[in-house]
Image (cartoon, helix red, strand yellow):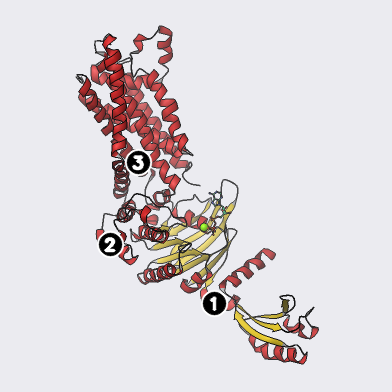
Amino acid sequence: MSFNRHGVWAIYTFEMARWRRTLWQSLVAPVLTTTLYFVVFGAAIGERMDSVDGVPYGAFIVPGLIMLTLFTQSLSNASFGIYFPQFSGTIYEILSAPLSSLEIVLGYVGAAATKSVILGLVILATGACFVELNIAHPVWMAAYLLLMALTFSLFGFIIGIWARNFEQLQFVPMLVVTPLTFLGGAFYSIDMLPPAWQTATLANPIVYLISGFRWTFYGSGDVGFALSLGCALAALGIGLAWVWWIFRTGYRLKQ
Amino acid sequence: MSGDAVLSIRGLSKRYGSGLEALKAVDLDIHRGEIFALLGPNGAGKTTLISAICGIVQPTAGRVSVDGHDHQRDYRQARQRIGLVPQELHTEAFETVRATVSFSRGLFGLPANPGHIEQVLRDLSLWDKRDSQIRELSGGMKRRVMIAKALAHEPQVLFLDEPTAGVDVELRRTLWTQVEALRGRGVTVILTTHYIEEAQELADRIGIIHRGELLLVDDKHRLMRELGRRQLRLHLLEPLAEVPAELADWAPSLEAQGTELVYRFDQRDGERRIPELLARVHALGLDYNDLNTSESSLEDIFVDFVAQRSGA
Ligand SMILES: Nc1ncnc2c1ncn2[C@@H]1O[C@H](COP(=O)(O)OP(=O)(O)OP(=O)(O)O)[C@@H](O)[C@H]1O
Ligand SMILES: [Mg+2]
């Protein structure tokens, strides 16, 4: 046995089954939140806003909204998925099974990323109910969505291993990623900011990630697509290296 | 490595982050098809030993090979052969019994086999509960679910870490029968227990572990014979202040405020001296209204042994 595909599949389907049991909560909350954003930003404020780069404001915020949900949901899904077995003790079985670290990551992160992609598509569909969407590069859009879902699920996995209590699980999504996403151009183009703020904003890595996704929709972003894609791949690389280090050192998983 | 060792442990050590040495260079061979009981007081290192073998704890030093496969270099082959029932009850709450047992089989790299899962569940009297969520089960049933999970991938070696802790007498008997049945099918069983009775009843060999050291490993019967002691207890009518010099040969002790005279002897030749002792007691004019002899349990053996060790 060189690759334990049954093992990966067992973890994957277990995680998806856990999600299906609470599917209603998992989907309804993000959809409701997104709808509220459309009502407030798209309809109420958007009416008074000019179009951004030739895109009506209501449509302009769709990629940013999808990314915001994708980031936070990937982090919380993946972190919970690996945190909970440690909390409940059932991790013993994963550790004693003939699974390589790559296979464990594949099972958990694969399931979390699947959920995120589904959620992203549901929000896209929700958005399409409110505004007219023309996606310039649908294949890139799908690929980029998958890339972001994988990357943030990987970071979520890391958080789940690092966290010592449920509060810490919420810490990074709430206090780091959500603010950075709001400030990272989810709801505006950074051209709209005063020059000093523009420079400061470019230090925020989320800017590059959101900009890339917006490019797949409208063919333009705050920065070039190649730079965005480079940042996205670098983020994935950092996540992979970090996880590899965790397993190599047994960090927090094994005494 | 002995020829028929299914599990071979050499110099296995574990020092926890806290600096505590929980295992000190343990060497142990487990024979294929035997039931091995690991006895030791709380904190002796039983769970640590099992965890280090199964990959839950990272050993500081030492090697383990399972059926000839190194447990780290060749971990897939090694772990495939091992089933583990941990000491604590760790179960998913919302999964059904059948789903969680099938999950375990998949985790260990085997394709689904509903027939085998059914057999395991029937053997453990869980078939009626197959579609119940685990949170709806009693503690004893949950423990059986853990055993079913450990058996789902048809392991050759099964670790049971205190399988009968918190289990009623009837279920304990059932579990014993099931352990015997497993042995009948060629599964090697290693169990830890605080119930000496359990080791006495089930095990072929017994290992005693204390403060991370494996003090002794022996055949159960020989262990009982070698280390087993008996005692003769006389209930005196008049309490004695001290043991009369005439009885010094037997080195008896006085207990219960001098109302009980206790002579301890080992299994081999001590009992031949009993009539002589009683004659001497009679000659001294000591009256007693009751007399009994008893065999030391494995528990006494264990306590004596550990006391000797820590005294030395
Ligand atoms: N994760 C840990 N970190 C630090 N020390 C530990 C850890 N786990 C166990 N120990 C210590 O290692 C020693 C051996 O513990 P272990 O759980 O192996 O004992 P045990 O023989 O299984 O005891 P029991 O019969 O109570 O289950 C104990 O002193 C315990 O406090
Ligand atoms: Mg223990």
Q: Circle 1 sits in a helix, a strand or a loop, which is it?
A: helix
Residue A161 sits in quarter: top left
Mark 1 highlights which residue?
A: B222
Q: Pointer 2 and pointer 1: residues touching (CB < 8 Å)?
A: no
Query: Quick check: can you spot residue B220?
Result: yes
Q: Chain of mark 1?
A: B
B4 and A44: which one is in front?
A44
Residue A68 sits in quarter: top left
Amino acid at pointer 2: Glu
Amino acid at pointer 3: Tyr
Residue B188, x across and y down, in percent: 41, 66
A53 versus A121 height, above or below: above
A230 and A35: which one is in front?
A35
Q: Earlier in the sequence, mark 2 or mark 1?
A: 2
The mark lying in front, picked from 3 and 1, is 3
Mark 2 highlights which residue?
A: B118
Residue B305 sits in quarter: bottom right
Label 2 CB less than 8 angstroms from ligand 2: no
Label 3 CB less than 8 angstroms from ligand 1: no
Residue B169, x across and y down, in percent: 46, 69
Q: Pointer 3 and pointer 2: residues touching (CB < 8 Å)?
A: no
Residue A120, x across and y down, in percent: 27, 29
Query: Quick check: can you spot residue A213?
Result: no
Callouts 3 and 1 on one subunit: no
Residue in the image at 24% along x and 10% along y: A54
Rendered image: mark on residue A108: 3
| Distance CA(mark 3)–CA(mark 1) | 50 Å
